[in-house]
Amino acid sequence: MKNEYLISQIHKKKSFLCVGLDTDLEKIPSHLLQEEDPIFAFNKAIIDATHEYCVAYKPNIAFYEAYGLDGWKSLERTMAYLNENHPEIFTIADAKRGDIGNTSTRYAKAFFETLNFDSITIAPYMGKDSVEPFLEFEDKHTILLALTSNQGAFDFQTKKIEGHELYKEVLSVSKTYKGSERLMYVVGATKATYLKDIRELIPESFLLVPGVGAQGGSLEEVCKYGITKDVGLLVNSSRGILYASTDMDFAEVAGNKAKEIQQQMAAELAKL
Amino acid sequence: MKNEYLISQIHKKKSFLCVGLDTDLEKIPSHLLQEEDPIFAFNKAIIDATHEYCVAYKPNIAFYEAYGLDGWKSLERTMAYLNENHPEIFTIADAKRGDIGNTSTRYAKAFFETLNFDSITIAPYMGKDSVEPFLEFEDKHTILLALTSNQGAFDFQTKKIEGHELYKEVLSVSKTYKGSERLMYVVGATKATYLKDIRELIPESFLLVPGVGAQGGSLEEVCKYGITKDVGLLVNSSRGILYASTDMDFAEVAGNKAKEIQQQMAAELAKL
């Protein structure tokens, strides 16, 4: 998917919401466990209820891998369903991969070709030749971890390297990679004020912002410091939508929750 | 697997060789492509031919994921074969995962429980709470990326942070993690002289050393700077063994290649 198309979808839906599909058999409504593929059944119901209010879905790959072959099948079915019914929605493989060149190429094929995701999250630790194989794919996006929303972000990411914080070095150095126009970045919402500095280094790149809601970030703060003239934000919510109800009405409640966030986003977009 | 058991296997086999299972349908002998599961058929033949000479196998997970469900099945079959026939051999999921806590727990379950690997490689960028969920598993090991053997290692890993290189900060900080006695580290062999500094920070930890052979590192150099009284090394070879011949005799040639490396290792162990 091209950036321009994603931006047009954001304006059309008045939303930059990404729904994280962290589907957990221990948390989904128990009546779904009788289905042949409970994970897919849950995802399908969530997608049907929320697709009007979001522009992206982000399956968290760990949740599928944990169930082995069955989990991988559910992921394939979820992606097939999205690609067939909602090709206008941006898909993110939240996989946090990254390896030496020929291995990164394999991961890129797995997610961009076999599963047909529009994008994938990547850890930057191994540098240029671990990231560039992903950037070679036309109309696919690589979402590099910059500043994550967890406590461990302070172990390395916020420490000074080359005169500024490591996450800023990741932003600066990655801009020199071949195909860097296809880069987006993960920036946790729990540190919204950091977004001001980040925008000085990458004024236009799309940011995937986790941690609004359950993890404590505020949408208003994120927009105040991070929004650009072309929006440049995808704000993720997972648990807050998926498990808003764990009863028979889970899909309806998830849809209402997504709508509620979409309406807050519409208000922020109206300020542009 | 406990460290003591791994060390006893190294002394018994006079080998600290890890065979990397980077199984690639474009590189395996063409007669295997007629098999029902060519990847497993290749892995089984390689394991049968090399198991006497190595103490570890390291499937490179990307190579399996790239084939979707079929690849995942081949990985499951390979692990079932290893666990049944060679439970004495240490298994490494070369997966380079790492995510926020509840997600890392999922990856840990996928590799330690569902697939029953002894260990997994992990990227350190997200810090403590992305690593500790892996360290909770008794008799399982977490192999943290410290200094990798690719060119991109110079993008961030060797830059100074807190007064020393980032990879040293990873070593120092990770030592404070809960369960750090279950940590091992990836240290690329292309920089064997770095091993001297590394041994000052982690005098006893096991190091997984890729990059000997195809990537240019020397076994003698690695041992000179990296070996400890309890060996403390697992040296990996992938392509140099797997694809030494791509003809009908591939398994025999792979066995000979592994034996050749084992004999060099026996000579190094004799110096202890």
Image: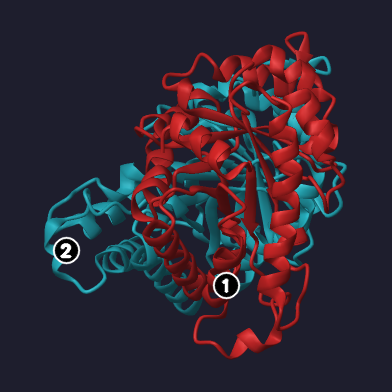
Chain colours: A cyan, B red
Q: Name which residue type carries label 1.
A: Ala
- Residue A190's x, y, as percent? 50, 25
- Residue A227's x, y, as percent? 63, 37
Q: Residue furthest top?
A: B163
Residue A254 in the figure: left or right of residue B243: left
Q: Residues within 10 Å of mark 2 (few under 14, many from 20)?
A: some
Assign the N terminus of chain A to one quadrant of the image. bottom right
> Which of these two is toward me, A139 or B230?
B230
Assign the C terminus of chain A to one quadrant of the image. top right
- Mark 1 element type: helix
Q: Name which residue type carries label 2.
A: Leu
Residue B264 in view here: yes
Residue A187 in the figure: left or right of residue B100: right
Question: Residue, x 52% and y 65% (percent of image)?
Answer: A89
- Mark 2 element type: helix
Residue A198 in the figure: left or right of residue B18: right
Q: Is residue B82 above or below residue B24?
A: above
- Residue A133's x, y, as percent? 77, 57
Tell me the tag on residue B45: 1
Tell me the tag on residue A33: 2
Q: CA distance from mark 2 to mark 1?
A: 40 Å
The chain that hosts pointer 1 is B
Question: Residue, x 48% and y 21% (percent of image)?
Answer: B180
